[in-house]
Amino acid sequence: MDTNRIWHLTNPTGNYIAQVCQNETSQAEAVIGYIKEGLLNDESIVVLARPALRKAVISGIDALGFDMQTIRDQGQIKFFDAQFLLSSLLIDGVLEEQVFQEYVGGPLQTLQLRYGKVRVFGGMVDILWKEGQYNTVMQLEDLWNDLSQKQEFSLLCSYSLDDLNPNVYDESFESICKCHKHLIPVENYDLSEAGVGEAVLDVFGAAWNRVVGKLAESKKISDQMPQTTLLN
């Protein structure tokens, strides 16, 4: 089995990636690699992550020889607590677009004006996904999509299988595919050792095929329906 094989979804330009990682260690490795590429390209970085992941990422970047403290002092990289940010965005269980724009869109725009290019790691989806809040994940996905129409940035969202009950893999993976149905699946993606097991990949692949099949069937039914014209 190829331990480097991983399923991820991306758009044609490759500036939006949704990725499934085996555990928090491989998730941290993926984020570190993503940040490293940005720093080497003199891009600004925004990391929305849990405290443990932020700590692992900072340690990993330091280990690569980057002076993280100086980079942070200069404002090139900014870290935010994903859980705290979520609590600020959720009003009665609904993500508020205006608050999202203020807390997320505003800082990204400031960084873009200063550095030109911005790359973001969004760790909020993983928190919601593990809690089974799939509808809220889709709300968040819509907010990211809307923001990407107004501002230019790269985005990585990753999902860790740590603490996830294997019995809900089918439902959980299908929710990821539904949230990212505008992306396309890419196999055999080599990203350090951040691979997932063959069985997990098969479940993910099956989930993607189900979502694609349902979309195709829905379109087929829609195409067969009589077309009507609205008259004023």
Image (cartoon, rainbow, N blue to C red):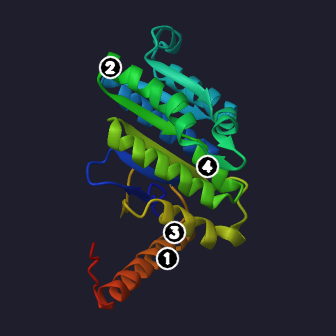
Residue at the disc numbered 1? 206
Q: Earlier in the sequence, mark 3 or mark 2?
A: 2
Kind of residue indicated by mark 1: Ala
Could you tell me how far apart the alpha carbons at marks 4 and 3 are, in whole angstroms? Answer: 16 Å
What numbered label is drawn on residue 113? 2
Q: Residue at x 69, y 43 (%)?
A: 91
Secondary structure under badge 2? helix
The answer for how far apart the CA atoms under marks 2 and 4 are is: 29 Å
* Vertical arrangement, residue 199 with respect to residue 218, above or below: above
Tell which of 221 and 125 is nearer to you: 221
Residue 88: where, in percent of width, then height? 67, 34
Q: Which residue is mark 3?
A: 204
Q: Residues within 10 Å of mark 3 (few under 14, many from 20)?
A: many
Marks 3/2 in contact by CB < 8 Å: the verdict is no
Which numbered disc, 3 or 2, marks the residue closer to the eye?
2
SS class of the residue under badge 1? Answer: helix
Residue 112: name its quadrant: top left
Callout 3 touching callout 1 (CB < 8 Å): yes
Position of 130 with respect to 17 (left or right) is right
Residue drawn at (34%, 35%) of the image: 151
In the image: residue 167, left or right of residue 68: right
